[in-house]
Amino acid sequence: MLFLKTILTTALLSPLTLAAPLADAPDPVADALEPRNTPAPPPSAFGLVAHAPGQPFDKLRISASRGGLALGAPNRDAVCGPRSDQRRPFAAFTLRGDGEWYLWDPKTGSRRQRVWSDVSGMGQGVLQYTKDERQARGLNLDRITTSEFGFMGAGTPERPSYMTWRGKNEFIACPSGKDGKGGPWSVWLNAGVKNPGWNKNCKPFRARTVQLPRALGCKYTN
């Protein structure tokens, strides 16, 4: 269940909740984007699209809302653009430094929101992001990873580029629908647990990267 992911997170950081169920919305602009070249000189923005043939979340974009990442739950509450009045239904990311994974914002400093995961037996690959850089400094780095993310693949239509962590390119999607079926799906890092957070019917997938050359900076909710 999604609420179990929140329980795990509470033990690692201040309380965070996952995205509330929202209906997906078509986005022809994002769907038309080509896989990004890799390696790409950071900081540059990219989106992530699920590659899971045969699964209901195949080709859905990863969104960010209320501290967590999800498929099939557009981040309608993200505040974007110079006037903070623009919206984007999917998340934009960037890598910095030693493979540190951030939500994209061309502005620098304390505003940055860092993506992190706990792959220990307790965290089971829980994937969350911080409110700002100050909150990121409070993470327990003995258990939590914020780096070693990267890309795998040529970044061409024939050989797409995928997000990786320590060379592994699998994530896990867990359904939140009734009886463990249907979306939205919470997104986890694959830590070797088939159904993390005591969810049911979770499925592995790869996260294909797409270029976002004109991505707006956004502030995502926690």
Image (cartoon, rainbow, N blue to C red):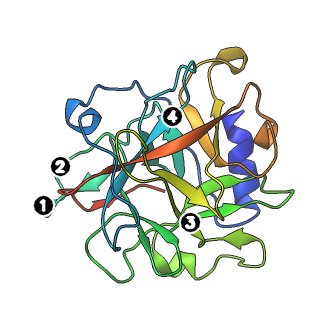
Asked if residue 48 shows in the view, the reply is yes
Which callout, 2 or 3, points at the residue further toward the start of the chain?
2
Residue 82 in the image: state x and y as whole percent: 14, 64
Question: Alpha-carbon distance for marks 2 and 3?
Answer: 29 Å
Left or right of 10 in this view: 114: left
Q: Secondary structure at mark 4?
A: strand
| Residue annotated with mark 3 | 149
Q: Secondary structure at mark 2?
A: loop
Q: Secondary structure at mark 1?
A: loop
Residue type at mark 3? Phe
Residue 135 in the image: state x and y as whole percent: 54, 76
Quadrant position of residue 112: bottom left
For marks 1 and 3, give the one nearer the viewer. 3
* The N terminus: image quadrant: top right
Would you call the spot at circle 3 few (<14 residues within 10 Å), some (14-19), or many (20 or more)?
A: some
Residue lying farthest left?
A: 83
Query: Which numbered circle lies on residue 1?
Result: none
For marks 1 and 4, give the one nearer the viewer. 4
Which callout, 1 or 4, points at the residue further toward the start of the chain?
4
Residue type at mark 4? His
Residue type at mark 2? Gln
Residue shown at 80%/37% (left/top)? 194
Which callout, 1 or 3, points at the residue further toward the start of the chain?
1
Residue type at mark 1? Arg
| Residue annotated with mark 1 | 83
| Residue annotated with mark 4 | 51
Q: Is residue 185 above or below residue 207?
A: above
Residue lying farthest right?
A: 121
Label 2–label 1 contact, CB within 8 A: yes
